[in-house]
């Protein structure tokens, strides 16, 4: 690595050094409490997958370049030069971490390894050493935001086809506007993922509740966050914020996508609308008596996987259980509980990387497979697309024999 590249990367590193990050970098007491916290280490047993070990890779660079004793630490192996080898180590640490933050709830100092990995990811982006596909997908989202008119017609055509399906299956009174778009002064802007599965069931529930809603032109997923590029994360986020402001909505409701929800909830700043997950919104309809569900539709014992970004990191824990209480009398919660729940193993961009990461995702998530199996459930519900994909892969790989379902789909199918 030449000096100019190193200097550029160190500037990126410097930009991440707020007070919280310095605390995470300077506080690890090497107590070892996090040793058993990470699903990757628990499933694969390799030291390099311990949370503190990952953090140490970033910490040694920090000591070398941002602490006065950097040179002295070098001889003790406590600091390390930023080199091509260091980049390889950063890649291994960052792209084997799903950002689930389970280690953080174990750590007595609350050290956030996911935040430390955000330094690793931004250095990889700066060195053009991140996974190309994630940057490409982020760039496509940004382009779409810039030239909405170019794709608008195709999008509207696709939605008209989906509307017919909503009307046919749920006999919607909403008729032609079963999936409303671009409605000025709507109460709620629903931000979905690309694909019918993310739009149709949610539309059925919104219409049944009599919601004054409108569908966003943009997909919820934020590939900028997966790849750890703050500039791209913000550009992708801003498309939705601007749309919500333009339409003057009161609520931005994020579909079953954990990262999209966390990014919108925690990074959109003070806005004239509130941010909810679709699980929260749909639970509210049930509480307000705006929808009713038929418990006889869902057969067999049901369990629920809490998406890390929605539950542990987003605080949405009671609402999915409230919904499930209206869907079944046979709910079996997982052990450990939602705060300590095992990650599905697909976050942090790993599912988005597809087959390239499949072998690792299966090996690194055997504890998740065991956790599902131990419930004895035959239906496995969740509220995140990433989790759904990963759990479906785990179901096949470990022959769990469960039916993996989105919570919103279960609700739509049980609407009275
Ligand atoms: S955030 Fe999750 S995946 Fe990453 S080190 Fe911590 S426990 Fe492991
Ligand atoms: S639990 Fe926290 S303080 Fe202890 S080794 Fe892990 S990261 Fe360091």
Image (cartoon, grey):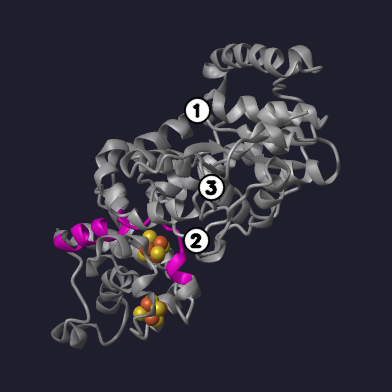
The x and y percentages for residue 282 are 72, 41
Occupied quadrant, residue 367: bottom left
> Where does label 1 land, which residue?
144
**Residues at circles 3 and 2 in contact by the CB criterion of under 8 Å:** no
- The earlier-in-sequence mark between 3 and 1 is 1
**Can you identify the residue that label 2 sits on?**
341
Magenta range is 85-104
Position of the C terminus, as image quadrant, is top right
What is the number of the mark on residue 92? Answer: none
Residue 4 visible within the image: no
Instruction: Depth check: give the residue in front, 325 or 119.
Output: 325
Distance between mark 1 and mark 2 Cα atoms: 36 Å
Q: Which residue corresponds to mark 3? A: 258
- Residue 415: tell me if it is visible: yes
Q: Quadrant of residue 73?
A: bottom left
The percent coordinates of residue 391 (x first, y second) are: 42, 43
Quadrant where ligand 2 appears:
bottom left
On whether ligand 1 comes within 8 Å of the CB at mark 1, the answer is: no
Which residue is depicted at the point 71% across and 14% down? 167
Q: Quadrant of residue 256?
A: top right
In front: mark 3 or mark 1? 3
Badge 3 local density, few (<14 within 10 Å), some, or many (20+)? many
Q: Residue at x 65, y 38 (%)?
A: 242
Asked whether mark 2 lies closer than 8 Å to ligand 1, one says no
Tell whether position 131 is magenta.
no
Q: Residue 366: x percent and y percent?
A: 33, 54
């Amino acid at each position: 690595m030449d000096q100019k590249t190193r200097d550029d990367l160190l500037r990126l590193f410097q930009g991440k050094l707020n007070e919280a990050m310095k605390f995470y970098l300077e506080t690890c007491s090497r107590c070892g409490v996090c040793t058993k916290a990470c699903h990757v280490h628990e499933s694969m047993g390799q030291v390099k997958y311990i949370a503190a070990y990952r953090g140490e890779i970033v910490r040694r660079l920090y000591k070398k370049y941002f602490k006065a004793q950097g040179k002295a630490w070098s001889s003790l192996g406590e600091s390390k030069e930023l080199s091509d080898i260091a980049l390889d180590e950063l890649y291994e640490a960052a792209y084997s971490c799903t950002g689930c933050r389970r280690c953080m709830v174990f750590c007595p100092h609350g050290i956030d390894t996911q935040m430390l990995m955000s330094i690793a990811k931004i250095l990889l982006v700066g060195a053009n050493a991140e996974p190309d596909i994630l940057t490409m997908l982020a760039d496509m989202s940004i382009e779409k935001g810039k030239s909405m008119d170019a794709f608008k017609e195709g999008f509207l055509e696709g939605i008209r086809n989906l509307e017919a399906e909503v009307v046919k299956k749920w006999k919607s009174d909403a008729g032609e506007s079963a999936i409303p778009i671009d409605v000025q002064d709507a109460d709620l802007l629903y931000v979905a993922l690309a694909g019918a599965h993310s739009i149709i069931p949610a539309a059925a529930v919104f219409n049944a509740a009599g919601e004054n809603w409108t569908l966003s032109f943009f997909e919820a997923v934020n590939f900028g966050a997966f790849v750890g590029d703050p500039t791209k994360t913000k550009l992708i986020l801003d498309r939705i914020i601007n749309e919500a402001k333009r339409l003057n909505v009161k609520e931005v409701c994020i579909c079953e996508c954990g990262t999209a929800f966390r990014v919108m909830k925690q990074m959109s700043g003070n806005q004239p609308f509130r941010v909810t997950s679709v699980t929260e919104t749909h639970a509210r309809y049930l509480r307000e008596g705006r929808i009713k569900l038929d418990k006889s539709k869902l057969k067999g014992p049901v369990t629920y996987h809490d998406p890390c970004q929605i539950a542990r990191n987003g605080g949405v824990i009671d609402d999915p259980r409230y919904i499930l209480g209206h869907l079944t009398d046979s709910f079996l919660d997982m052990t450990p509980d939602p705060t300590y729940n095992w990650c599905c193993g697909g976050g942090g961009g790993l599912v988005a990387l597809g087959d390239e990461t499949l072998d690792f995702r299966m090996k690194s998530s055997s504890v998740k497979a065991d956790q599902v199996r131990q419930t004895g459930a035959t239906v496995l519900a969740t509220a995140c697309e990433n989790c759904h994909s990963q759990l479906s892969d785990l179901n096949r790989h470990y022959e769990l024999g469960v039916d993996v379902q989105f919570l919103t789909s279960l609700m739509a199918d049980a609407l009275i």
